[in-house]
Image (cartoon, rainbow, N blue to C red):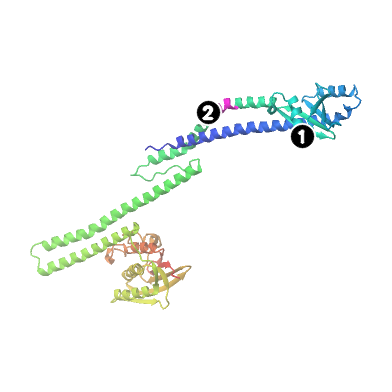
Amino acid sequence: MMEPRLRQRLAASLSRVLWHTLIVYAVIVIGASALVSELSLRRALDHSADVVQSLLGLYADPGGERTSVAPAMLADQLLEMSEPFLITRAIATEGGDRTVYFLSPTMPAKEVRVAPDASHNQVRRQLVTVIAERGRWRYRVGHRRAGDFDIFVAGSRVPYLVAMLGLGIVALALLPAAALVAQRATRRTILAALIPFARTVEETQQIDPRDLSERVTSPTGLTEVTQLADEINRLIARVERANAALEAFTADASHELRTPLTHLRAQAQWALAEHRSLEEMREALGEIAREVDQTTKMIEDLLLIARGENQQLELALQPFDLAEVARDVEEVTQAMASGRDIDVKADLTDSAEALGDADRTRQILLNLASNAVRYTSRGSILFELQRRDGMVGVSVTDTGVGIAENDLDRVFDRFERVEGSRSRAHGGAGLGLTIARMLAQLQAGSISVESTPNKGSRFVLWLPAGD
């Protein structure tokens, strides 16, 4: 199933949001206009009721002697008002009936008889029909009591209902056009925003796998795209380093394997030559066996490095006594240095609990010790316990040939033998320190080195403290 493009999905989502927003906005505008109109009408009715109440002093009692000036004057004043109104006053008769007198602009004085048990609301509804003959929903009626009088003022909703209707028609007519304009603007905005994405994709596609030195342009103009471009660049850098390491490893391994294979072929050809004595053939076969052992050891080391770098090397991480492991390595070192003018010493009286793999730790220290013996013709090798924040360690210090400062960063590289003294003549394939550093890192540890040419070197294995 084909996945939708990002711009299509964004456009569809934003279109729905725009439609909903515009509809809600239109409803809110119409509702707010209706509310404001209703409040304005109510305020106008209150004002009219104030005016009517101020004129009640001119109104004569219909039950008493009527005047000819006040009702006419009152009617003239009230006729100038835009809202229809009623002024009522209920008077109880001797028979128990009630008579309601009301005054309106068209009928200055009129008498309406109602039932004795009629409630105020029934009287109000009866009088309102005089005002709102065409439907009460078209009018808003305000009521105010002023002494014995009831004032009813009616205001028509028709004007603003017509305005609301017109506003609704205009909104319905303009809503599609507004949505269309907003959608086009949104599409243009989305396309403009996706330009950095498209440029990043295009630049990524143009990177040749055979030449990983190129990078994606950064910054791109958008923070999110810049972060993506930076991550792509970091990924390309890691791949470039991995490829470079693989090429170097292949070249180094080919070179390192070519030498013993050439030696093996030469020994075999020499042994197969005519007139070789039995002793000479045994010597040649012994050289071949030793070369095969060294080559096999190098291949095993390469496989160990490959497994470690691919996270396929299992380690039993648990607390163990680092001092005890170092004492075992010290004994082995004394055996390796036997017959040479080397004094192997140790300061390992205390215990030091570390968290790691004891067997792999022993392998690391043996690599460090064998290097110390290999590159120390005379002098001493010293094992000491070290401590620092959250870490414990074992230092291996020798008085050998040392390492130049410029070469310290390269001593852990594969097949690296710095200085002329660190050559195949000393034995080994240059993988011991590489394996040692890898095993230390797999245990969340590290190896530090300090060295002075012609004075010696000091390697320290650091591991997390077990406590």
The residue indicated by pointer 2 is 180
Identity of the residue furthest to the bottom in this view: 349
Residue sitting at x 43%, y 40%? 200
Q: Write the residue at 79% across / 32% down.
A: 116
Q: Quadrant of residue 58?
A: top right
Q: Nearer the viewer, residue 164 or 134?
A: 134
83 magenta-colored? no
> Which amino acid lies under the numbered mark 2 shown in the image of this protein?
Leu
Q: Can you say which quadrant of the picture contains the C terminus?
A: bottom left
Work out how far the residue at label 1 is from the one at label 2, CA to CA, in angstroms. Answer: 58 Å
- In this orientation, which residue lies closer to the viewer: 331 or 25? 25
Q: Residue at x 85, y 34 (%)?
A: 148
From this view, report whether residue 311 is shown above or below residue 27: below
Q: x%, y% of residue 206?
A: 38, 39
Q: Secondary structure at mark 2?
A: helix
- Return the residue found at the far front: 95
Q: Nearer the viewer, mark 1 or mark 2?
A: 1
Query: Which residue is identified by label 1?
Result: 119
Residue 213 vertical position relative to residue 370 in the rendered view, above or below: above
Residue 103 picture location, percent across and down: 82, 25
Nearest the viewer among 363 and 48 is 48
